[in-house]
Amino acid sequence: MVGRALTASLEADGVQVVRLVRRSADVGPHARYWSPSEGVLDPAALADADAVVHLAGANIGDRRWTDAVKRDVLDSRVAGTTLIARTLARLPAGPRPALVSASAVGFYGDTGARVVDEQAPRGEGFLADVCSAWEASLAPAREAGVRVAVARIGVVLDRAGGALPKMLTPFKLGLGGVVGSGKQGFPWVSLGDVVRGLRFLVEQPALSGPFNLVGPELLDNATFTRELGAVLGRPTVIPLPGFLARAGLGGEMANELLLQGQRVRPAALLAAGFEFQDATLRAALTRALGR
């Protein structure tokens, strides 16, 4: 979803976008082959780029977290990121493409009532471990002098995909409500601002390091629930107790995706001069839902 939207935004401004594809049948003038599982990526595929934006990774919420699924979530991020970082490092000395890589606010673990920014250490839990390994795999590019910016992305809100469409049916039926205590942080961001934020990281040559790509309005699950209900014009009185979430998803998955959360400030982006188009959750939901 993010890649498609970013591609459309860039192409609308006349920027040539070349995709990395995993099927040889898809290779063409603007699509080049790679295979993260086999370690295949021709350096020539990246040599003429101004920047590489890496967003690939297995969905963390579409399958129950078995050991095999957790390995896939981790490997799909680390293998691809390592391959891109090493390939960029192998390019001839001199100016190399910048690398903007996705990560996630799961890096911080469960922050409780504590508000964190990019200076905070990594947290605990499976997603924190994944994000830490994901970001560490960028090291070959950074050590070779490549400018590396990491976008720690929050919950992306758009009707086209991600978490929001899954919420709409119960809310429209009047079955929406807080999840667990409702006090867990909800680090949201609109799809439009994710695209604009990624472009900002690509286009600003002085920016490197981690950047929290989340909306500037700090809120919790209970506030998100009320706001979504208000935009939809539906009640939000039926809660999802923690024990039911754990029964449906398993304890670890339910805890990390639903019952825990992060209160995250986009301090580095704001300090760099980035301005959010959707600075409030109400604005983001209104735009995403066409209200």
Image (spheres, helix red, strand yellow):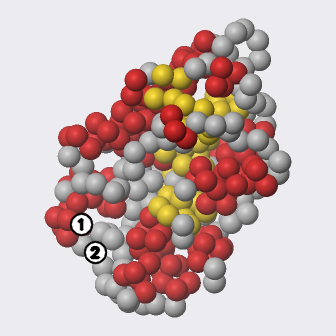
On the rendered image, what quadrant is the N terminus found in?
bottom right
Camera-side residue of 181 and 106: 106
x and y percent of residue 30 in the render? 68, 38
Looking at the image, residue 270 sits to the left or right of residue 43; the answer is right
Label 1 to label 2: alpha-carbon separation? 7 Å
Neighbours of disc 1 within 10 Å: few (<14), some (14-19), many (20+): some
Q: Is residue 173 above or below residue 7?
A: below
How many numbered marks does the figure carry?
2
* Three-letter code, disc 2: Leu
Q: Are marks 1 and 2 in contact (CB under 8 Å)?
A: yes
Q: Is residue 74 above or below residue 171?
A: above
- Judging by the rendered image, the residue that carries numbered circle 2 is 240
Q: Which mark is residue 124?
A: none
- Judging by the rendered image, the residue that carries numbered circle 1 is 245
* Three-letter code, disc 1: Ala
Q: Is residue 149 above or below residue 112?
A: above
Please give the name of the residue rendered at 38% of the width and 89% of the height, measured from the top-left corner. 174
Q: Which comes before the other along the chain, label 1 or label 2?
A: 2
